[in-house]
Amino acid sequence: MSTAIPWSVKPHPVTGIPNAKLGIWLFLASEVMLFGALFSSYILIRTGSEQWPMGRTILNIPLATLNTVILITSSVTMVMAWASLKMNQFGKFKLFQTLTILLALGFMVVKAFEYGGKLHHYEVTLVEGSEAADKAGALKITGHIDHATAGNGGAITSWIRSRDDLHDGKISFVADPPAGSHEHPAAIELAAEDMERLTFFGPHRDTFFAVYFTLTGLHGIHVLGGIVVLLYFLLPGSRMWRTDPERFTGRIECTGLYWHFVDLVWIFLFPTLYLL
Amino acid sequence: MTDTHPNGSPGAREAHGGGHGETSFLWKYVFSQDHKVIGIQYGITGLCFLFFGFTLMMLMRWQLAYPNQPLPWPWLAELLGNIRAPGGVLEAGFYNQLGAMHGTIMVFLGVVPIAVGAFGNYVVPLQIGAPDMAFPKLNMASYWVYFCGGVIMLASFFVPGGAASSGWTSYPPLSNIATQGQTWWLVGMVFLITSSLLGSVNFIVTIVQMRAPGLSMFRLPFFVWAQLVTAFLLLLAFPPLEAAGVLQLMDRVFGTSFFLPSGLVVNAIPYAQTTGYSGGGSALLWQHLFWFLAHPEVYVLILPAMGIVAEIVANNTRKPLWGYRLLVYAAIFLGFMSFIVWAHHMFMTGMGTVMSTFFQTTTMIISIPSVIILTCMILSLWGGSIRFSIPMLFALAFLPMFAIGGLTGLPLGLTLSDLHLHDTYYVIGHFHYVVAPGTIMALFAGIYYWYPKVTGRKMSGLLGHLHFWPTLILMNSIFMPMFFMGMAGLNRRMYDQTVYVHGRGVQPLSLMVSWSAWMLAVAQIPFIINFFKSWKAGEKVNDNPWEATTLEWAAPSPPPHGNFTTLPEVHRGPYEYSVPGQSGDFCPQHARPDSASEGTPSAPPVPAAH
Ligand code: HEM
Ligand SMILES: [Cu+2]
């Protein structure tokens, strides 16, 4: 317990809001600066680079669209949760709060699939003039690894990060379908010594993926943080409803403000990364 | 009233709900949510870090005074070990660690926590007549997150390769390819940034929402205004550094290339070959993000100091501050401008003349409010009957010291003269005049001034004099020579300057700096004795020993949990000293209009309206 803090529940007569609401707005202002700095970095790096991949050609737009819908819906259920408290319907609040959490979890699951796709998608840079380069018809090919064998003949089942993980072995590589088709070409055998670089589509692949993973990752952490807070107010935190309903409603409102902000960040991220 | 003991009035405690759990030592002094306890925690921790950062510097000064000679005491060499000091001689890489960590610790773990965490926390709620900060739990969290950040920074000295060694600025690409200590530095910074974020939200909400009845914004003491502007700077300038920290962490941990350009060559080997990095990043991007924080950061270092000095000057001249509103507007303008001057640290990066001209212009503009603030304070002295108390001595010393620091900054803000001065000891001299003889003196002033509020006792005047005079002289004999060394062309961050002819030329000055720095440490002994001895044995004083007007002096010393026996109500501006027609020479903010003419220190706090 602490001292009785004025305006912790009732709105201040001059500013018209209670302390916590001003606090959350200030916090969001700092968040704007955080993401603003990251977006600015993105612009600086993109304008400074010689070439930049089009997001829509390498990222999964359908999944991202689905996630956009999920997140916007969760913003709606969040508002409903708060409105239910305002209308004194605690049961409905529990329902909408649960829905919000489920949608947030849904977002994370979709995100995990999206990330997983990237982590198992590879790019091979072949040694110039090698037989393999002739066979593949290009120096750089992208696709996935069907199976891999180590130099001693044993199969590699673990996740491959780079050429070193092959231990002088080889991979059977299925290239992506050429533009305008959905047919994968036949798998080709590539030996470790044929490759200059083997990399999955992780953050280190190029600055585009560096930006993609950093921004969506940081946003994902914000979603996770939101889930923790939402769960707290759904379960142990909701006891306050019985002792101090007004304060509890205020807390849900602040949570909601944060949640809408997380939603808004995604609304910016989606076109910036996936469409532009 | 004047002799009210801290917890003397049980009614007050009850009224403010001392509450359960508060009885155990752990909850009362360690995980306390009381802004006063947290303020003291910040203060003590900050002073320890200040001392530690200073110790690192004293080590460096040995190498600079006596290049490549073994340390004077064998036990010291032993303590550092063979890696850091082979044969007793400081190793060059370790010298770099010392420099980087001196800067980091002084700024982020020493001065800011004391100026904002300690003074802000302790004094602001009292000065605005609030029972506590708006979010006591956040306040506690902010201290402990800061504490963890500090522990991480200290621990980094013991990881393989040692602590961060790329300067407090951590410029890539060197910082990107540095040893593990740099990662620790980044993680530590994330903690410190989080802490100051929590703190700044708390300060703003407290000041905006929790002022006592009648305390309008323009009746706030200037110290509170300074803290408010500071809090906005922390709130808005730190996140870009957090962004930069995240990007550098990504570079170091996940192998991205945000700050690594294509074609980087390290030790004659193409970096891509050894690491498989992709390139395509920009080293300058870091500098932009870093200085976007770090320029406002210098105002975070100086604004609270100005606030402290303003309080003490008004109190000891027995006059209202000259140009109070001007001071406030200047501080706000300073806050705004500090966001658009950052690239004056980057004139030498080849970012282009248009950019340079823009930032040169904004830099000249931002010097105007600083000069206004200084001028107001100097004019405040005019015609006052000055009380040369110990706090006032330090505050008076602040004024010319800050002036030297500020004025020597102008040649650095002009592209032409910066060409010559950039990255030399001139820069070191310039900003230290602001932060050491400037801010540190103001912090001492604040400690002497508010000590009676915290403890109910005054610090010794004799020891105060013994502390003040040597400190003032030594601060100058440390930092003044640096201007001349810098103008002679001596680079900063130099392990052994005697390898250059121009370095050997100024080596006598380097000796003078080092000896002054070591003597400065000795000169702090009276302060340390004074600080601890007075806690129990200092002269007992009443609640308002300086006969001051602001609200903190209306509370008992030390203030109980909840601060005021009755919440004060404010009837006038902050500095009503020597108002013509009044009998006393000061009139507290909370004194009722009818009792105003009495203006005695024992004017009782008026019961709050509600
Ligand atoms: C009064 C005692 C102090 C002394 C004797 C001192 C001395 C020095 C010296 C000689 C350097 C230059 C080292 C080099 O270039 O190799 C330096 C760097 C620095 N100092 Fe201090 N300093 C003191 C206090 C402070 C304070 C109070 C602060 C901050 C609030 C501070 C912040 C810094 C910073 C940021 C650097 C730059 C580090 C870097 O190059 O990355 N110092 N100090
Ligand atoms: Cu600057």
Image: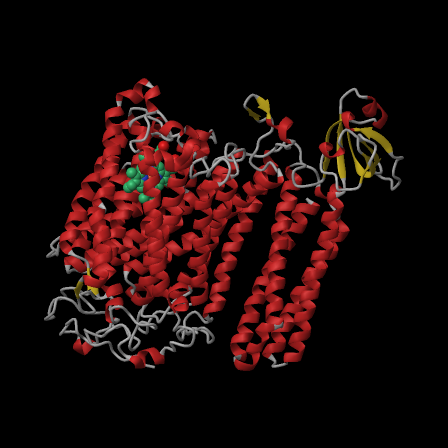
Task: State left or right for residue B475 relative to residue B43.
Answer: left
Judge whether B553 appears above or below B383 on screen: below
Task: State left or right for residue B429 relative to residue B322.
Answer: right
Residue A162 point in image, percent of width and height: 71, 35
Residue B531 point in image, percent of width and height: 24, 55
Closer to the camera in the image, B425 or B360: B425
Q: Quadrant of the C terminus of chain A?
A: top right
Instruction: Name the residue at 40% across, 72% down.
Output: B22
Instruction: Name the residue at 40% across, 43% down.
Output: B104
Closer to the camera in the image, B132 or B25: B25
Q: Is residue B406 visible?
A: no
Instruction: Name the residue at 34% across, 81% down.
Output: B610
> Which quarter of the picture shows residue B10?
bottom left
Residue A186 point in image, percent of width and height: 89, 35
The image quadrant in which ligand 1 is located? top left
Tell me how many marks there are: 0
